[in-house]
Amino acid sequence: MVNGEFKCLGSTQHLKNKFSKGFLLTVKVARGSSDAQQKRVAGVKDFVMSRFTGAVLKEEYEDSLTFHIPVSDLKWSQMFGLMESSKETLEIEDYALGQTSLEQVFLFFTKYQRVTE
């Protein structure tokens, strides 16, 4: 509900499919010396930005990067394939690719909430 009106109704998956604005990609880069790690992080950033159209770096903390990837023509299998094929080259320790969470879908609606004083 936003301002006393229903804005969406349906199952969790229905709401995600209808209102999701993309995917979240979290990448954990292998640790190493400071210089080597900075190069790995930069390499991962360049790779994701060039391979996933419209990708935006949302969070960066030491060896962990989180990107928002808007919905595109790429299929899940293609996105996973890109990550798997580059995992060793980019020295990626781990990664997770997932659909926008239900919480994020609901937060999308909060921007339509009017503030009353």
Image (spheres, grey):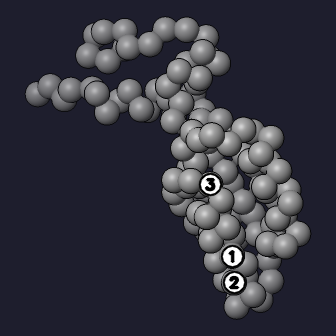
- Please state which of residues 46 and 116 is positioned toward the viewer in this rendering: 46
The secondary element bearing badge 2 is classed as helix
The secondary element bearing badge 1 is classed as helix
Residue 8, by quadrant, is top left
Q: What residue type is labelled 1?
A: Gly
Q: Where is residue 32 in the image (x, y as percent from the top left)?
A: 80, 83
- Residue at numbered disc 2: 39
Which mark is in front, 3 or 2? 3
Residue 112, by quadrant, is top left
Q: What residue type is labelled 3?
A: Phe
Residue 82 relative to residue 98: left or right: right
- Residue at numbered disc 1: 43
Q: Residue at x 60, y 33 (%)?
A: 101
N-terminal-most mark, 1 or 3: 1
Residue 64 relative to residue 110: left or right: right
- What is the spatial separation of the Cα atoms under label 1 and label 3, in whole angstroms? 14 Å
N-terminal-most mark, 3 or 2: 2
Which mark is in front, 1 or 3? 3
Instruction: Using the image, tell me which numbered label, if any, was put on residue 52.
Output: 3
- What is the spatial separation of the Cα atoms under label 1 and label 2, in whole angstroms? 6 Å
Q: Can you see residue 65?
A: no
Tags 1 and 2 touching, CB below 8 Å: yes
Q: Residue at x 30, y 9 (%)?
A: 5
